[in-house]
Amino acid sequence: MTRLNLFAPDVRENPYPFYAALRRGSPVCQVEPNGMWVVTRYDDVVAALKDTQVFSSAGLRVASEPPHLERHNPLSDSLILADPPRHSQLRNLIGRAFTAATVGSLEADMRSTAARLADGMSQRRVVDFVSDFAHPAQANVLVQLLGLDPARQGSFQRWTTDILGVAAIAPDDERRLSEVRRTIDEMKTCMKELLESRRRQPGSDLVSGLLRSRVNDCALTDEDLMGFLFLLFVAGLETAVTLMTHMALILARRPVWMDRLRAEPGLSAHFIEEVLRFEPPVHATMRLTLAEAELSGVRVPAHAVVALLVGSALRDEAKFQDPDVFDPARRAPASLAFGHGAHACIGALLARAQARVVLEELLRRYRRVELRAERLDWNVSLNTRCPLALPVEVIPA
C-alpha cells in the first residue's frame, strides 16, 4: 500500500479528505516523509498530548540541533522541547511574566497598528494580505512585547524561516547551513544585547518581567531566557500570521460572515474559535515515543517520530457534527488549536486578543474581502499550513 505523502501538492492544498480517509481506515499509521507515524483521531491526539512520559517533546531536540549544524541552537533549550518536570518549571517561571496584564498592555498598540495597515490596504485595494498585513502586524507585536528596536523587523521573517528549517537541511548543503549559522549568531547577539539592556534598565516589557520572575527562589537562567526568546520569534511569528491569514481567507470565501459579524459583534469570539478549529494555526505537533505505545489498536514502536495531526483531530466526525462545515454556532469539545495539557500554548491569550483586534479593524473598514487568485501556493511544513501569499481586493464599507 502506498503511503500518503503529507508534502504532496494536492495534500498541502486540501489535506482534509486525506485525513478523513485515514481516520476511517488507518487512524494511526506511517506516512511520508521519512516513514513517520501520524495520529489522526481526536481522542488519540488528546491521549498522546497528555502522556508526556511516552510521547516526548524533549526527544526531538536533536531535530533543532543536528550534528552537522555545528552550532548550538537555543531553540533546543526552550519549553516546547522540554518534558515535565523541566517543562513545568520553565512554564511556571515564564507564566509569571506572560500574564493577562501583559497582553492587555499591548492592545492599544495592536489596534493602532492594525488600523494603520488596514488603511494602507484601503489605498491600494489589491494587496497580498500575508506580506501587507499579517507579517508586519505580528512583527510589531514582537517589537512591543520585547521592547526591540523597530528597525529589526525586517529580519524577523528570515530568522523564523531559517530556524524552523534546520531539520530539513541536508548534511552536505553547506550554503544553507552557513546561512542558518549566521542567523543563529545574529539572533543570539540581538537577544544578548536585549537581556543586558533590561538588566541595566528594567522596564514594563516582557523581558524585564522574565528577568524578575521567581518561583521558590528559582529564576530563569540565561539559557532559559535565550531559548524562550528564540521560541517566541519562530513560533509566535508563524502561528500568528497563519491565524490572521486564515481568518481573512475564510472571510473572503464566506462573505456572509462580514455582514453577520457587523450586525452581531457578539459573534466575533465564536467566529475566532471556529477559525481556530477549522484551520488551526498549529496543524501538527511532533513527538518521539520513549516506549512502545498503543492507540486505536495500533502499536507504535519506541523511538518513533510521531506527528499528532491537530488539523485532522479538529475535523473528527466522532467529535464534531458536520466537521467540514464552518459553523461558529457549533458546540464543540475542548479546542486543541493551542495544544492541550502540559504543552498548552502559553501565548494563546495573546493570539486570541490579536485576532479579535484584527477582525474588528477589518470589519470597521471593509464591506468585503475578495479573493484575487484561482489557486493558492501553500507552505511546506509539518507544523503549520498557510498560503505563502493571499492576493485579495478590499472593498471599503
Image (cartoon, helix red, strand yellow):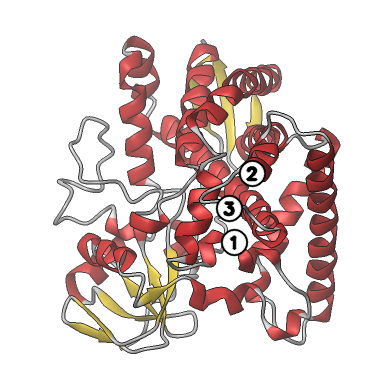
Res 78 label: 1
Tell me where residue 112 appears, x and y as whole percent: 65, 17
Tell me where residue 266 appears, x and y as whole percent: 31, 16
Label 2, label 3: how many angstroms apart (C-alpha)?
18 Å
Q: Nearer the viewer, mark 1 or mark 2?
A: 2
Q: Is residue 392 visible?
A: yes
**Most foreground residue, 216 or 329:** 216
Helix or strand or loop: what does disc 1 sit on?
Answer: loop
Q: Are marks 2 and 3 in contact (CB under 8 Å)?
A: no
**Residue visible at 65% across and 21% down?**
109
Q: Are marks 1 and 3 in contact (CB under 8 Å)?
A: no
- Residue matched to label 2: 210
The answer to which quarter of the image holds residue 299 is bottom left
Q: Residues within 10 Å of mark 3 (few under 14, many from 20)?
A: some
**Most foreground residue, 72 or 379:** 72
Going from the N terminus, do you reach mark 1 or mark 2 first? 1
The answer to which quarter of the image holds residue 158 is bottom right
**Most foreground residue, 198 or 336:** 198
**Residue visible at 28% across and 67% down?**
40
Q: Are marks 1 and 2 in contact (CB under 8 Å)?
A: no
- Residue matched to label 3: 235
Relative to 240, does residue 300 appear above or below in the rendering? below
Going from the N terminus, do you reach mark 2 or mark 3 first? 2
Helix or strand or loop: what does disc 3 sit on?
Answer: helix
Label 1, label 2: how many angstroms apart (C-alpha)?
14 Å
Tell me where residue 67 appears, x and y as whole percent: 70, 85
Tell me where residue 169 appears, x and y as whole percent: 69, 77
